[in-house]
Amino acid sequence: MPQIVRAGAVSHVGRVRSNNQDSGLVGKHIHAVADGMGGHAGGDVASSIAVKFLAEHDVQFTSVSEAQEGLTALLHEANELIVDAARTHAELKGMGTTADVITRIGDEMVIGHIGDSRVYRYHSGELKQVTVDHTFVQRLVDAGRITPEEALVHPRRSVLMRVLGDVETAPDVDTYVVPAVDGDRWLLCSDGLSSYVDEAQIAEVLARKVESSREVGDDLVQLALDNGAPDNVTVVVLEIGEKPLESIKPKVVGAAVNPMRYASNAPKRVKRLLPDVLQSRRKLAARPENEEFAAPTDEMFNRILAEEKRFRLMRRITWSAAVVLLIAVMVGASALVYSWTQTRYYVGEYNGNVAIYQGVNANIGSFELSEVIDETDLSVDDLNPYQRSQVTGTIAFATLAEAQDLVERLINGTAPTQPEEEATPVPTSTPTPTATSSATASATSGGE
């Protein structure tokens, strides 16, 4: 029969947080990850209460159905302790935590899940997310309103729809039953890993042959840190096999390692997972929602959707205004450039004759930046080669008068007929005849 042959847990505070609000558990029978609601006082307390309670009730269930009911009951009881602590200590009001719990029953893995921490199964070389996030964006994905890729960068991706804790609704726990297969690896993790490491990278790490599950956990946490994870990162790694590969000792990591700073005044829960525990659940009194939790009611969902609609509308208006402003700037700049071009003139060819153009000899697409304002009767063919090349290549002027002056000279034949020649360099010294040369010249002269 398959069993858990390796188990390891690792937790890290992350690159930004000053305290660790995650907690993790590797037990004899129960294993868990809890992620305290970040940004609120008491997130570490909430996750610690949940994990410590699970560690105290690390029992073995006798059947899958009992495990499903038992894990649900455990999470409800942990929720009661968190609520009691928040009632006793006002500074903890609004605290909460996610929770994922897993246990093996024969050849099945039974999971209890609430929040956005995740459980993955690595089976036959493929990684699959078993749990479904209880988040606002996941509900949008399920409703077909956004894609999974859009959910990764959605501005409300941190809004939780279900948690344990001091919130305005009783916890609604999901349970899953999945086969336990020899060679599988299971991963429980907080969103400090899943939000910053893609599944392909996680699968690559889980595929490695290593000496311990702790080593796998260390590699996953380091990968999250290398990817810049600012949040707490907690992982629990389990390996399924036929024979034990390492001694599994119960341990907690993260916030649950620290002594409890706050305690509930409620009667201590006894170690039992019986129907009367299930029947003892009670709905919590309405409490102000905090910024990371939204009650999973249609009214709340529609309210957030309305906010999203307003946000998208404002974003469209902003983008539209920006586009209009950009177009206005471009049009204004174009108008200024065009106005400047119309202060320029040049002499060129038009229909074989010499002509004066206003503007510059250039186009913007199909739009010409010049037009003929004076076409003469002087044919370009009547010009000498130098003048013809100058006119066909266009001659630019700053004023109309200068252009008219050149045309007048071309007509009268007084325009330059060739380029001005450069002056011939003057030698720096003139050779002086030598004495021998002078004498020879004299002798020659006398001989005549």
Image (tube, rainbow, N blue to C red):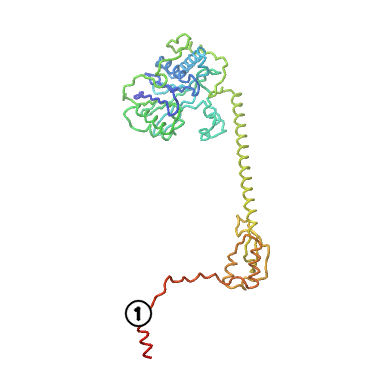
User: Under tag 1, what secondary structure?
Assistant: helix
Question: Which quadrant, please, contains the N terminus?
Answer: top left
Disc tally is 1
Q: Amino acid at mark 1?
A: Ala
**As rendered, which of 41 and 181 lies closer to the eye?**
41
* For residue 214, side relative to residue 402 (left or right): left
Q: Quadrant of residue 109?
A: top left
Q: Position of residue 281 (x, y in %)?
A: 51, 13
In the foreground, 164 or 30: 164
Residue drawn at 42 percent across, 20 percent down: 255
* Left or right side of 433 for 314: right
| 111 sits left or right of 5 in the view | right
Q: Residue at x 31, y 24 (%)?
A: 246
Residue 69: x and y, percent?
Answer: 47, 17
- Which residue position holds label 1? 435
Look at the image and tell me in which quarter the C terminus lies.
bottom left
**Can you say whether 279 is above or below 100 in the image?**
above
Q: Residue 30's quadrant in the figure?
A: top left
Q: In which quarter of the view is residue 409 placed?
A: bottom right
